[in-house]
Amino acid sequence: MAPGVRLIQKVSSTRTFARIAPHVIPAMDRTVHRLTRGKVLLSARMLPGLILTVPGARSGQLRSTPLACMPENGTEQSWILVGSNFGRTGHPAWTANLLAGPGKAVVNWRGRDIPVRATLLQGAERDAVWQTALKFWPPYATYQARVEREIRLFRLERQGDAAT
């Protein structure tokens, strides 16, 4: 575990963090990502991260959101996204966008745009991935305890030519 990770996990579990972080962290990530032409994502210094771009569920306009992710199996073929919304009440908007257009998403992973298909995980599969997510980032348990909704989990799988 990287130095300071436990401290950051404690801080990220607080209600104050949940109020402030959604406004600050994505804005910083988007700016740095744009300025470095996709090479740097600040929040990825703590957790792996990507930029998800998907058409808005209602507007159809492309929406780009920096998100923490769990790469699966050490490959660049699939990722898990956790719709925790920092433990706030509603589902994050990007989850509705993925539900509306599961095959229209693109991730920017390590500076490369990769078309993906999103699948909402449910049942036993969701339960197993949730346990992995809790080991990956324990504050997810605090976020879930804070809200009545079930936190959405998505698997994003690379579409098209895997060599791209």
Image (cartoon, rainbow, N blue to C red):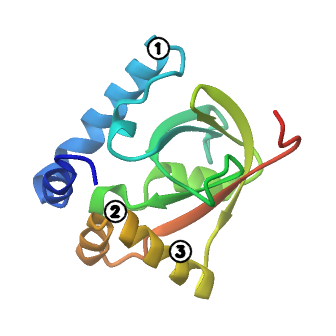
Q: Is residue 88 visible?
A: no
Task: Name the residue: 22% across, 51% down.
Answer: 5
Q: Image height check: is 152 above or below 74? A: below
Please tell me how crowded label 1 is: few (under 14), some (14-19), or many (20+) other residues with Cα within 10 Å: few
Q: Write the residue at 39% across / 38% down.
A: 44
**For the residues marked 2 and 1, what is the alpha-carbon distance in whole angstroms?**
27 Å
**Residue under label 1:** 36
Task: Identify the residue position indicated by label 3 in the image.
Answer: 129
Give the mark nearer the N terminus: 2 vs 3: 3
Inspect the image, locate mark 2, and give the three-letter code of the amino acid beneath it. Trp
Q: Secondary structure at mark 3?
A: helix
Q: On the picture, is 163 further left or further right than 157?
A: right
Q: Secondary structure at mark 1?
A: loop
Q: Identify the residue under disc 2.
A: 137
Residue 142 place in picture, x, y as percent: 24, 71
- Characterize the local packing of mark 3: few (<14), some (14-19) or many (20 or more) Cα atoms within 10 angstroms: some
Q: Position of residue 116 (x, y in %)?
A: 73, 47
Q: Quadrant of the N terminus?
A: bottom left
Q: Are marks 2 and 1 in contact (CB under 8 Å)?
A: no
**Residue 138, which numbered label?**
none
Q: CA distance from mark 3 to mark 1?
A: 32 Å
Quarter of the image holding residue 85? bottom left
